[in-house]
Image (tube, rainbow, N blue to C red):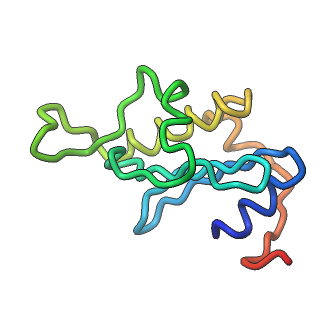
Amino acid sequence: MSDTALTALSRGGGRAVAIRWNGAELLKYAVDGEMKVTINIVATQYRTGSDPTLLDRHMGGLRFDIGGPDNADPVDPRESFTSALVVIGRITGQEINKEWLDEPHVGYIVPADPR
């Protein structure tokens, strides 16, 4: 999801969270029309946004980084993705588990430029 669409969804006091997993493994979080943080979930030192550490309190006890010179205990990329789903559950109060993923849900089309 584009930053423009995500921030538009969060305008007026709302929150919006998105995950991307296909070439760019990103977790994005917008609040009240502002992109607060975008985190690369396989290399969490790469962050952008107005408050890059905002989600740190939701990331406690989870494993993300898949490797690098400082990482002696690399994480499988699938675990990084699962950890990101846990963060989304902690933000929203709705656990994103296998049962939730298997249930039908309402879907919405969000245009890339929602003006």
Indicate the quadrant containing the C terminus: top left, top right, bottom left or bottom right: bottom right
Residue 46 position within the rendered picture, expressed as x and y whole percent measured from the top left: 36, 52
Q: Residue at x 79, y 49 (%)?
A: 32
Q: Residue at x 80, y 63 (%)?
A: 8
Q: Indicate left or right for 73 with 94 as reference.
A: left
Nearer to us in this view, 81 or 30: 30
Quadrant in the picture for residue 108: bottom right
Q: Is residue 3 above or below residue 91?
A: below
Q: Where is 108 relative to 58, above or below?
A: below
Residue 74: x %, y % from top left: 20, 38
**Left/right of residue 64 with respect to residue 27 in the rendered view:** left
- Disc count in the image? 0
- Location of residue 60 (image quadrant): top left
In this rendered view, identify the residue nearer to me: 95 or 112: 112
Question: What residue appears at the point 43 percent right and 57 percent down from the top-left corner?
Answer: 25
- Outermost residue toward the front? 50
Pick out the residue farthest to the right: 12
- Pick the front one: 99 or 17: 17
What quarter of the picture does the N terminus occupy?
Answer: bottom right
Residue 12 percent across, percent down from the top left: 90, 51
The structure residue drawn at horizontal position 17% and vertical position 31%, both measured from the top left corner, is: 73
Name the side, left or right, on which 74 lies relative to 36: left
* Rendered position, 52 above or below 20: above
Question: Residue 113 vs residue 70: left or right?
Answer: right
Front residue (pair 45, 27): 45
